[in-house]
Structure formats: structure tokens, C-alpha cells
Image (cartoon, rainbow, N blue to C red):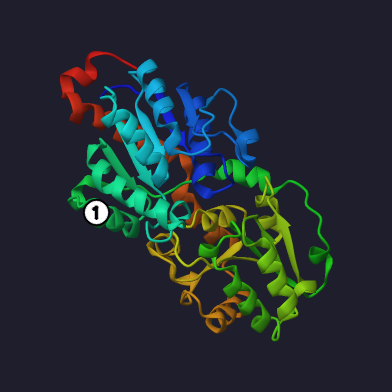
Amino acid sequence: MRAIDRLTLFLPELHAGGAERMVLDLARHWTQEGRQIDLVCASAAGPLRAQVPEGVRLVDLGAKRVFASVPRIAAYLRSNPERPCWSFLSHMNAAVLIAGRVLMNHPSPIAVQEVSRLQTGRDLRKPFRRRAVEVAIRALYRRADIIAAVSPDVADDIVQLARLPPSRVTVVMNAVDLSAIKRAGLAPFDHPFFGENGVSVLVSVARLAPEKDHENLLRAFLIARQSRRLRLLIVGDGPCRAQLMESAVTLGIADDVDFLGFDDNPWRIMARSDLLVLHSLAEGFGLVLVEAMACGTDVLSVACGAGPKLILTDPYFGPTPPVGDPQALATAILDKLAEPVLPASLATCAARFDIAERARTFIEMVAHGWEARYGTHQAHKSHL
């Protein structure tokens, strides 16, 4: 099998999302293994730019829009013909395939990975963009050497939209750097909510966007706090912030809810909270659940897809309330706080998603991509 010593990762931007964090974790892990990693962004703007690992070469294409970066992606690929590529997020995947399989024939494998449901992904909220990406997926994904999805739900979306046989899509669940998260969780964090006796603190870590359905969380919190002293910390930023803050005032819970905005170390907040709640309309995976468990914090998710279901397989996590049902979510919150999962069980569950195993899987898939593209003899002929 061909040794993969160089690899290029593609992201649209460096937003504070789970996909972006995982890519940075992969880049860090591979760099520590001695591989040469390029991280190419249509625009390297975003709060995670400061967290690009040492030793990773950041290539900022400086494009205002992802599809405007296609000529620059093609130029990069021409200059780096022996670099396998792994792209993340729908519109970036389409741009890389246009550059590498339409404008030219990049001689190295190109892999694309979907990290969210195609019906509700954050890249597809605008109708025009959604339609453009859907057309691109149908026309382009069959040109990829490797197609990966973070859950069976996401894989089914790709198969249906791209009209591909199921065998063309591989499910590779997300992962996190557990040791790094545990260390980050030990960092200090002071907040008045943590100093109150007899109070349980809930935490939400998600972009403040419609698909995350914070409104349902606020309504569930309103109901649950009638039975127990609760506080709620909301970590993240996004277009719905002002609306959500207004909702908290309207519901009469503003004094017990704090919108903290973006935090480059949300794990220290998770580690001090009693329960993390995932409340999205749909999730491709739900990486934040693994991160919270790595911090020793119990978790609760609504039934928002196969990803969270794959994570919370053990019966002690209890039932998952339906999406958009604040009463059911409130009941589940109270039940979880009454009977929390033991820290040892949380650690065991989180260990299944350590970055080392996923990083090895990705490399093996790229190596097999070489063999499928050129045959075993050619794949062994030289080392990247």
C-alpha cells in the first residue's frame, strides 16, 4: 500500500463549527506523525484561524465566495500534482471537483466528505445556493475517488441526490482529539451561575442559526425550571443571536440565560456544566456530544438524526425526545439531571471517537484510492 506522506485538506472558511475543528484535529495529528499537511481555504477568515496547528501550511485563496475560488484551486492543484486531496462541506467539495476533475484531471486521489444532512446543512440555507450545490453534487460526486459521510443518514442523502450505488459512499464517523479536549477542559472559567448552591447548569454549544433550533431549547428551559433551579449557558454566535436574546426576554427567562458568544475554548465551560443539550433540527453527526463526554459532562440529544443515535447507543443515556417538542425535551432534561450517567461510562463512550483511529482510517482510504485509480503496482511505485 502506498505511503501517504503529503495530504491537502480543503475547507471553505475557518468558522467555529464541528467540521472545522475536526479538520484541524486531523491536521495536527498527521503533522505530529511527520506528514506534510496543507490546509487550503477559499477564505481563511474565521475564529479558528488562530488555532491552525503549528507545522500545517495554511493556503488562503482569498476568495469572497467558494465557487469564485475554483480557478485558484485549479492553480494550486497544478502546482501540487502528487498531493491527494480531502475536501469537507458541500460547496467546497463541489468547487474542488470542478477544479480537479473538470478543468483538469488531478493525478492524485480526490476525496469529498459530507458532514451534515443535505436537506438542512448550514451551507444550503439559501435557496439559490442549495439548488446550485444539489446540481453540482449530482453532476460531480461520481468523479470523486472517495466519497465519505459521517452517518448513514448523510450517506443516504448522497446516494439519493447523486444517484450513486450505496457501495460508492463510505460511512466514517467524526472524531475528536480526546486528550487535547480533556486538557482544555481544565482551563479556568468563572461565571456567576457556577457559584449558586442548589442550581444545575445546562450548556448549549452551537452556532446560533435556524437549523440549531435554540427556540425549542429556550421553551424547554422555561418549562423545566418550574420544577428545578436551572441556569442556561449558550455558547456560540450567529445570525439568530438578537432574535434569541429577545425570545429569552419575552419568555421571562433572561436572568437565568446567558449568551456567551463564541469561545475558543468551549470545553472549559462544558466541563463545569451539569448537562450539555443538543437540540438541532437535524445533525449529520453531533460531535459536541463526544466533546462534552470527554470533559466528563453528561449529554442529552433530541432525535435529530442517525449521528447522535450512533453516539448514544448505550441504554443508560435514556430515550431521545423528538425534535421541536419543548415539553418532551424539558422532561428529558429533568430526568437526566435526576439520574446522570457516571463519568466512567461517559469516558468509555467518548473513547470510541478518538482522533487517532479516524486519522488512520482516512489515510488507509486515500491509499486504497491510489490503488483503485492506478492499480496496485503504480500505487507502490513511489512515495508521496
At 50% across and 76% down in the image, what residue appears?
A: 324
Number of numbered discs visible in the structure rendering: 1
Q: The disc labelled 1 sits on which kind of residue?
A: Val
Look at mark 1 in the image and give the residue it sits on.
159
Q: Quadrant of residue 21?
A: top right
Residue 81 percent across, percent down from the top left: 33, 18
Screen quadrant of the N terminus: top left
At 37% across and 30% down in the image, what residue appears?
A: 85
Residue 157 percent across, percent down from the top left: 30, 57
Furthest-front residue in view?
Answer: 128
The answer to whether any part of residue 170 appears in the image is no
Q: Secondary structure at mark 1?
A: helix
Furthest-top residue in view?
Answer: 382
Position of residue 350 relative to residue 102, above or below, is below
Please tell me which residue lies in front, 356 or 235: 235
Position of residue 19 relative to residue 10, above or below, is below
Mark 1 burial class by Cα count in 10 Å: few <14, some 14-19, many 20+: some
The answer to whether any part of residue 2 appears in the image is yes
Position of residue 34 relative to residue 244, above or below, is above
Residue 358 percent across, percent down from the top left: 41, 41
At 67% across and 61% down in the image, what residue appears?
A: 241
34 lies left or right of 258: left
Position of residue 359 relative to residue 316, above or below, is above
Screen quadrant of the C terminus: top left
